[in-house]
Image: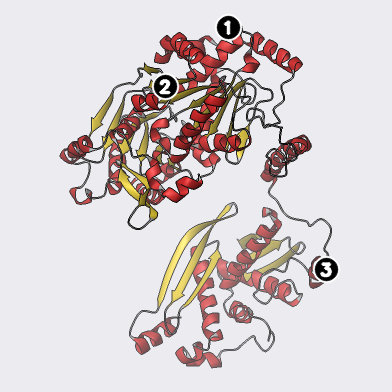
Amino acid sequence: MDMIETNIQRTYGKTWQTLKTKRVQVGDTTSWQTELSVALPQHLSVAATAAKKKESEDLVTLALYNKLKDVGALEKLLPQADALPTARDKFSDNEGALLLQSVQQNVANAKSIVIALYERVCNAKNSEEFRPQFETRMDACRQWVSRVSVNWPFPMVFDGVGQKKTQAEGQACVPLIDYLKDNGFLDRRLYPKMYTDDAKRALRNRRIGPVEVALRTNMTPVMEDILDEFETKVGSLQEIRQSCGDDGEPSEEDDEALWDIMTGRQLCIEAEQVKQRDYILKGQDDGTASPGIRSFRQSLPIYKYRSDILTLVQHNQVVILAGETGSGKTTQVPQYIFEDYVTAACGSSCNVVVTQPRRISAVSMAERVAWEREERVGFTVGYQVRMKRETLQQRGGIFFCTTGILLRHMQSNPCLQGVSHVIVDEVHERDLETDFLLILLREVIKKNPDLRVVIMSATVNTQKFSNYFWDAPVITIPGKLHPVREYYLEDLLDARIVRSKDLADPVKLVAQVVEYIYYHRAPGAILCFLPGWNEITYAVRELQKLLPPYAHGWILPLHSKLRHEEQWKIFNSPPDTLENVRKVILATNIAETSITVGDVVYVVDTGLHREQRYDSILGVPLLDTFETSRSSMRQRRGRAGRLHPGECYFLFKENNAVKRPEFGSIQENAISSSRKTML
């Protein structure tokens, strides 16, 4: 290869190759992988893997030698190649003949080929027992004697002798390769043929019947869990189909049938079931709750207003509740209402639907309330979000869902029959679905006088909502926040935490501030607010450059596009075995409300969010990045002081914060009038 490179440099006057070698994990073993790319006389790229670094480099050199000859470039660069003995006379249809020829000339490469060959066998068989075993020793004549033992295609042993250890191992591998090739166990590329030609034809012709596959043993319990879950859901499918169409919604054949959002079945209230349910719920409410949980609930600021809230809800169809961050409104208000009914021995008549703007909020709040009630989800607490739900077994309880789920339910049950209370949480976000729901509820309560509506938020223009619902009463609940110290951009510049050249883009400052907190502040998780997915991925890459490799697994993105299981990782904490590792959460405004991550102590706020707004000039909605409002700033700041004293780092100047609007823009401005009409 040195002669080839010399000729290329003489002909073209530049370097011809790029060689990269790195460690890779193959199964349970670590191997060396070498990639060789050449630009002249044409672009070619080859790769090889072996147990040792030098072996992988030798293999990739042979592979490149083979490619150069196949494209007709070898004769031009190395005229002596024609004089080399060739193996193509014996294997005219073999693409690996050149490699076999090299093995016969240089036995040191034979071991690398055998290791790579049996690596493929182990992966195909999913077993480590097929790896070749080498026994090498020095005999009395001061010569090295090597023996290689293999178990595929059946147990075999080959011996070799040489002046050096590597030479002896290569001499043992050469007859092994020759035997496998001559007896049809290798294909044209010297890859192992796991099936004979007859077996392959039989598999191709077989259309019906089980196919044998190789699976790792640790996959068995995972597959069993999936099958159990599938059988459980399919077992109840027949019951659902009796009352639903194929799409899981009420059948059009029975226009009078109503769908119960609480149980996921047809709305059917039977006196005997109601009596039994009331008896069970009453028996559960015997005051035997855990003292720790009871003490925690009573310590929340909202507990002092329990009787006032129940009185207002009982005597008014609509109540506006403005509770500051940390007051406990989201988890406690639905429980107060439900417990009041249970105490009166009519718990089955209380069916509270709580809407949340985001899926993770609905699921996490349902599980939190179920934990406080010391029961599993599905007994008196349920939830439903897109692609995931846990409905109640019987009527009577609290049901969390996204706003879109309730709107879809109202298509088949427009008057919300079977629902006693609707709690609309986080209305300050003023998204299109929430505003549309409020419009519908305003009409529904005219036709359903028994329905009660509670509108809640941490920061909301209460007078505006009160006026919309005919001067509905307003109750304000103070919050319970630990002190949070604020730092603005000028403070970070004075402390030299950030560089002045990056001030134009707050996103570029996130990694610098996180690095400072990570290494210089007291322990505690870090929550960063960024406008969108692209900014989150950028921050992840930058943090991976600044933080130690063992901490990369705790850099957690939080975005609505992620699956629920990935979003749920933010509630976990690093194990005690990982010392000095913090959890770093990179989130959009999805983490702004309703989500409490207990160990968050530090908040980094870019002051930006992504929003769709309608451009009246272009006549189309545009998705762009805008500054957050002051109410959003307070919400984000409050994430750091929920359970501990915290710190909030605003990546913009204080005078900029003062100029921002108190509340965000209404999302109705994000759509055209034609779409509003369709809605």
Q: CA distance from mark 1 to mark 2?
A: 30 Å
Q: Nearer the viewer, residue 442 or 329?
A: 442
Which amino acid, mark 1?
A: Gly
Foreground mark, 3 or 1, reads: 1
Earlier sequence position, callout 3 versus callout 1: 3
Foreground mark, 3 or 2, reads: 2
Residue at 63% across / 78% down in the picture?
96
Neighbours of disc 2 within 10 Å: few (<14), some (14-19), many (20+)? many
Determine whether the residue tagged by mark 3 lies in a helix, strand or loop.
helix
Residue at 65% across / 87% down in the picture?
88
Q: CA distance from mark 3 to mark 2?
A: 70 Å
Which labelled disc corresponds to residue 677?
none
Q: Which residue is mark 2?
A: 320
Earlier sequence position, callout 3 versus callout 2: 3
Answer above or below: position of 438 versus 612.
Answer: above
Determine whether the residue tagged by mark 1 lies in a helix, strand or loop.
loop
Residue at 82% across / 63% down in the picture?
207
Q: Position of residue 488 (x, y in %)?
A: 22, 36
Q: Which residue is mark 1?
A: 287
Q: Nearer the viewer, residue 137 or 582?
A: 582
Answer above or below: position of 469 versus 430.
Answer: above
Q: Which residue is mark 3?
A: 205
Q: Splitting the image into 4 quarters, where does residue 589 fall?
A: top left
Q: Nearer the viewer, residue 679 or 598?
A: 679
Q: Are dots 3 and 1 in contact, CB under 8 Å? A: no
Q: Is residue 236 left or right of residue 330?
A: right
Q: Is residue 58 left or right of residue 390?
A: left
Q: Nearer the viewer, residue 115 or 484?
A: 484
Q: Position of residue 647 (x, y in %)?
A: 29, 30
Q: Position of residue 345 (x, y in %)?
A: 64, 9
Q: Is residue 105 left or right of residue 665?
A: right
